[in-house]
Amino acid sequence: MKTAAIIASVIIVLGGVFGNFLRFSEQMPDHPPDFSIIPYTTDDYYGEERRFAEASYEVLKADTTTLRRYVDTDGTIYWLFVAYFSSQKYGSQIHSPKHCLPGGGWKIQKLEPFPFTFPGGVVHEINRVTIQAPGAKQVMFYWFETRTG
């Protein structure tokens, strides 16, 4: 009986050690993304690189970002922001617009899932958000991709 308890205890301890190893191990990417492959112009849009205030990047702490302002042939403005983190440390949170936008004075009016078809026909459910601030109302789309899917 005593031997069985010792064996069970050893198995539990080894399982815990292995579980923590998996939990805290990081798989680093081979290389950061190349945002230059995102086109600046198409038949319908013209884009240019922009920047947030430097303080925003200090809070975000992303490894690389791109902020683009696109204008279509009708003069409608569209924004694209992509942030890349080579590592998401355990216990830290993703910088979600649900947390950041209210801090910037925006109110989330509506948040709903939206099926988006990517090039190649892959459909991925993303977030469609209607936001409002004094004198402004916008629709934005966002999603996160992590190493676990």
Image (cartoon, rainbow, N blue to C red):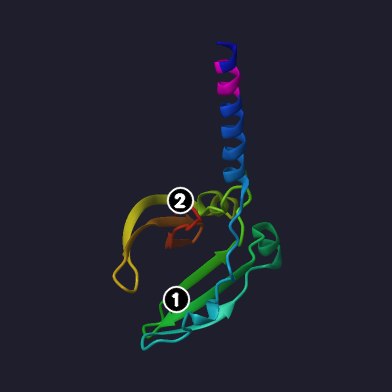
- Tag 2: amino acid: Ile
Q: Residue at x 50, y 50 (%)?
A: 98
Can you name the residue that lies furthest to the top here? 1
Q: Residue at x 62, y 36 (%)?
A: 17
In the image: residue 52, left or right of residue 116 = right
Local packing at callout 2 (Cα closer than 10 Å; few below 14, some 14-19, many 20+) is some
In terms of secondary structure, where does tag 1 sit?
strand
Can you name the residue that lies furthest to the bottom here? 43
In the image: residue 89, left or right of residue 119 = right
The quadrant of the rendering that contains the N terminus is top right
In the figure, 80 relative to 108: above or below? below
| Bounds of the magenta segment | 4-9
In terms of secondary structure, where does tag 2 sit?
strand
Q: Can residue 21 be found in the magenta stretch?
A: no
- Which residue position is annotated with label 2? 108
In the image: residue 75, left or right of residue 147 = left
